[in-house]
Every structure is written in C-alpha cells, then in structure tokens.
Amino acid sequence: MAKDASFDVVSEVNVEEVKNAIQITLKELTNRFDFKGSTVEITLDGNKITVVGDDDFKLEQIKDILFSKLMKRGVPIKNIHFSETVKSLGGKARQTADLVSGIDKDNAKKINNKIKDAKLKVKTQIQDDQIRVTGKNRDDLQEVIQTLRKLDLPIELQFTNYR
C-alpha cells in the first residue's frame, strides 16, 4: 500500500530577516543625500513595524526602500499590512504595520473551498494557522499548489513539509 503524500500551506514572516532588512534600510538612508537632516525612524516591536518620516513623501520613500530590502531577503510583502498615516506634533508622519503570520479562518475557508472546487482526490485539514493537504497522487498535490498560487489573497502562501 502506498503511503499518502502531503504538504502544509502556511503563511509566515521571518522576523529575523525583517530585523536585518530594517538595519540595512536605516544604514542606506543615513548615507543618502536627500535624507540628510531628515527624520528617519524604523522600529520593530513584536509584530509591529513603526515608520516615521518628515512628511508623507519621505515616508513613502522610506517604505519603498524597506520593501525592496525585504523582498531581497525573501520576506513576503503581502503579509505586511500598513495602517493610515498619522500626523504627529512637529509635522512628522508616522505609520504602523502589522506583520501577519498564519492563515486566519476566513482565508483558510477560501483556500479549502478552492481546493474542493478543483475536484482533485486530496484531503485538507485545517490545523491552527496552517492547512495540511494529503493525497495518494503527487501530481494532484502539485496541481493543488499551482491552483493556490493563482489564488488572490491578502497574504502570501508558502508550501512546506512536502513529503
């Protein structure tokens, strides 16, 4: 009897890589001519990033550089959800972002329904903040992965523990 093959669908953010990207971004911004004498702050507190700049324009530039560094380090940008810009005293602009790890129940249901709609011979099981997909045929599992890559969700999916 053949053993079932499986993989896990997860959505994770590596906090260490986020810290590294923030350090590299701050180092680059201190050396840039257009940011001389400007306020540039990027802090990570738990799963929250706070970005402070002189105004909205500088804030967007800081975020663009941060995103480019995060992408180079393999951090999923879709899992960073920024809030509205808040003006503080002194005219500074501040934005906070949540680092989203794990698949919430709504997205898990969407993923589950998409897999069922594909009518493949696989089973899904929601386990806390991840989904395990099992099946006898590895080709079906590959097809599930391709189907989920096309799915438009507010988080980025990773596929791990492929056995």
Image (spheres, rainbow, N blue to C red):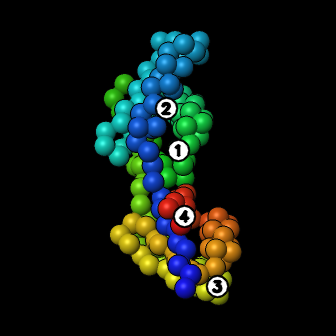
Say if residue 32 shows up in the picture: yes
Q: CB atoms at circles 1 and 3 under 8 Å apart?
A: no
1 or 4: tag closer to the N-terminus: 1
Kind of residue sitting beneath label 3: Leu
Contact, mark 1 vs mark 2 (Cβ under 8 Å): yes
> Of label 1 and label 2, which has the lower sequence position?
2
Amino acid at dot 2:
Ala
Do the residues under discs 3 and 2 have CB atoms within 8 angstroms?
Answer: no
Task: Identify the residue at horizontal 63%, vertical 68% (top origin).
Answer: 145
Disc nearer the start of the sequence (1/3): 1
> Mark 3 or 2, which is nearer the eye?
3
In the rendered image, residue 61, in percent from the top left (x then y), is placed at 58, 30
Mark 2 against mark 4, which lies toward the viewer? 4
Q: Which residue was labeled with disc 2?
A: 21
Mark 4 and mark 3 lie on one chain; the one further toward the N terminus is 3
Query: Tag on residue 75?
Result: 1
The residue carrying mark 4 is: 162
Seen as rendered, the residue at the extreme left is 46
Q: CA distance from mark 1 to mark 4?
A: 20 Å
Q: Position of residue 60 (x, y in %)?
A: 56, 35
Mark 2 and mark 4: Cα distance apart in space: 28 Å
The secondary element bearing badge 2 is classed as helix
Quadrant holding the N terminus:
bottom right
Residue on which disc 3 sits: 120
* Amino acid found under the numbered disc labelled 4: Tyr
Relative depth, front residue between 50 and 73: 73
- Between marks 3 and 2, how big is the CA–CA gap? 40 Å
